[in-house]
Image (spheres, rainbow, N blue to C red):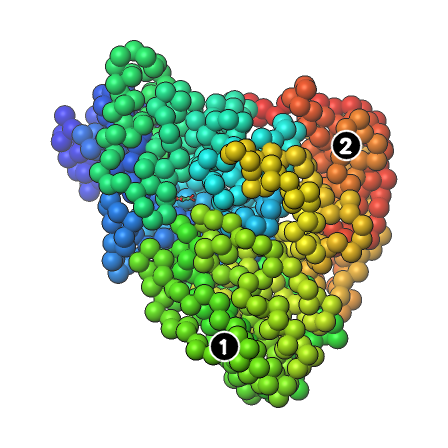
Amino acid sequence: MTAKFRIFTAAMLFAGLAAVAEVPVYLDESKPLEERVQDALSRMTTAEKIGIIHAQSKFSAPGVQRLGIPGIWCTDGPHGIRPDVLWDEWEQAGATNDSCVAFPALTCLAATWNPEMSALYGRSIGEEARYRNKDVLLGPGVNINRTPLNGRNFEYMGEDPYLTSQMVAPYIKGVQENGVAACVKHYALNNQELDRDHVNVLVDDRTLHEIYLPGFKAAVVDGGAWSIMPGYNKYDGEHACENPVLLLDILKGDWGFDGVAISDWGAVHNTEKVAPNGLDMEFGSWTNGLNWGASNAYDDYYLAKPYEKLLLEGKLPMSDLDDKAARVLRLIMRTSMNRNKPYGSLNSDEHYAAARKIGGEGIVLLKNEGSLLPVAPDVKKILVVGENAIKMMTVGGGSSSLKVQRELLPLDGIRELASGRGVEVLYERGYVGDVTGEYNGVITGQDLKDPRTAEQLIADAARAAAEADMVIFIGGLNKSDNQDAEGADRKDFALPYNQDAVIEALVAANPKTVVVNLTGNAYSMPWVDSVPAIVQGWYIGSEAGHALADVLFGDVNPSGKLPITFAKSLADYAPHAKADPAMYPGVDGDVHYKEGLDIGYRYTDKLKPGRVNFAFGHGLSYTNFELGKVSLSGDGLGEKGGYTVTVPVSNIGRRKGAEVVQVYVRDLKSSVVRPYKELKAFSKVELAPGQTKAVKLPLDKQAFAFYNPDTKLWTVEPGKFEILVGTSSDNIAARIPVNITEPLTWSDSVR
Ligand code: BGC
């Protein structure tokens, strides 16, 4: 039978004929997806169903070969397509066709505050995945930046649930246009790497729904994600992969998710718990997903033979297996079995251009006293200092590590642009950080050793600084353990490797010093008042050198805004404010999110002024903008109603540029404690010098609501609110009162 179907289908394809009666329904792409899924399922044995719900190698799962149903191949994610590893080991496969474009890290994408950049990112990385024949892209990540110590924040989209929600959906749609599934991760509450396999998060329901779930909900409901990855951690005593509240009640219940819940690598622990509680596919058991792990263990996976045994003994219901298998079939039909998907492309000029554009839009100009930037025409000699100017940043950091086709280093990008302008660029190291350059067998080949002592390095850099017209320091963190890397957290909030001393010596030697830091996290800045210009550069990927130089020389006018708060000290983040180990890193395995909603600016808004170096939403431009008179239209919230905020924005400077209008909502009187203000709308607008545009920002009922844990309903209480309109969370230009007259409630369920 099978052979006959295959021959018949192939013959039809060659003859260019339409599929007719003899083609089984599941192979007939003109039939509705659900009919095809059920048809395939009805032809499968129990063993075949078991076969498709767990891995057969480090990154693949088999389909049903007897029926001609292909398997799926997964790949990390989320910044580029990971190089191939061996079938059964973490070592490199040594392929020659797996070098990719590294796109900017997701913190940089979030800093664009531009959903169009998310769409471009998703489309581009989806094309790379498709070309490499990958069916599931393990990303994007949407965990909220709770603490700046989390080693993995660079893979996420910042501290704000609304910003994250707006940025994630276009990324997912862009990936999936290619017939490649996005796998949004790490669901949910995976907010620290320290003890990530066991840490048990205790969080109140309101905080869960208002802070930690919206990004995932947007990925599923607005983005239509075809898969999701429950993480390593526990929530309320159960591992995320075995957690019925997260998987059954919320994901598959309230949000109506029809895709596949794919375990993080090695995140499943128990057949009796995982099978009935909503996980659909198991990967990476007995590995840490990074570098160690047993081989050939696939039959022993919790969702393999041990599950089959319990099913056959009647101890677990077959209906659960059918549901899992149907979901996996749906995923296969949406991806590997879809004959109508595009071919994709790899390392294309368009992808490099996308990486450069997104990088340029995400770089944030934090401070620019005396208009030190962009580099002035009379600057003829620039000294660049710092390890991150010469270090490849695409290798390292854990599972997001890449093997790039090329990566333009910041120093080379600066040299390239400077040479066209007759500017001499000299380099001094300043400090030695981490000279290693290897991840999972991908070796940068860079020799970054320097025999000089720390004192000598500083003295040499300061001497050269005194002789330059301008100094550009490029430092920050890197992708080594205990920096911005998976599997461990940072040990403290300061920049490592004595960089503060280097910066202070440079600015003392030459006041025209710009500090550019490449990080995925905030850090302390003891030199913030003495350094005239500061740039937050994130990790930018293959086009780091171009994107940075574009901004430094003014070819790109910066328009990035911070997606995280840069507070003065670690204690200015609520989870660390009391130095309570129960809040971080946890006691006896429990981490208690006692700070509730007080994440990022929701907490610093309550502090005395001066506790923040650079606020959430902050970012400067080389031009100036002015907001005109803000008006509010609309007459209530109602079922489909809402308000529209209209803001005229003018470019009153001399360069073309883009501004992000931000709308925060403040509840003046409430029966529950509410944050001082919360971001509820934003829009990026590009303006020529002298141009004015009226920006319209909608506010629906969700913008005024809080989650009531007793009724489990989103709730708007009548009363006075204020709409705060500005260009950063600490630069509010207008406050518009609004009176809500009708109470409203609705459930979180989208069904
Ligand atoms: C990470 C995931 C990743 C997976 C596969 C795990 O260690 O947490 O984000 O997708 O490995 O590499």
Residue denoted by label 1: 453
Judged from the image, the secondary structure of the residue bearing numbered disc 2 is loop
Q: Is residue 724 left or right of residue 481?
A: right
Name which residue lies at 43% across and 22% down: 277
Indicate left or right for 364 with 649 as reference. left
Mark 2 burial class by Cα count in 10 Å: few <14, some 14-19, many 20+? few
Q: Quadrant of residue 241?
A: top left
Please name whichever residue, 292 or 328, is drawn nearer the observer in this view of the structure: 292
Q: Is residue 120 visible?
A: no
Whole-percent x, y for residue 608 in the image: 80, 50
The reply to whether callout 2 and callout 1 are in contact (CB within 8 Å) is: no
Q: Residues within 10 Å of mark 1 (few under 14, many from 20)?
A: few
| Above or below, comparing residue 432 to residue 100 in the picture | below
Q: Measured from the top left, where is residue 570 in percent x and y?
A: 65, 51
Location of mark 2 (residue):
673
Q: Is residue 111 above or below residue 465?
A: above
Q: Secondary structure at mark 1?
A: loop
Residue 447: x, y in percent?
Answer: 38, 73
Q: Residue at x 75, y 75 (%)?
A: 370
Quadrant location of residue 633?
top right
Q: Tell me how far mark 2 sits from mark 1, CA to CA.
A: 54 Å
Label number found at residue 385: none
Mark 1 is on which residue type? Thr
Residue nearest the viewer, comparing 557 with 297: 297
- 166 lies left or right of 64: right
- Total residue callouts: 2
Query: Where residue 108 sits: x, y (%)?
Result: 56, 56
Instruction: Work out whether mark 2 precedes mark 1 in sequence or the reverse, and give the earlier one.
Output: 1
Question: Which quarter shows the C terminus?
Answer: top right
Of residues 139 and 123, the one drawn nearer to the viewer in this rendering: 139
Does the Cβ of the disc 2 residue fall within 8 Å of ligand 1? no
Q: Quadrant of ligand 1?
A: top left
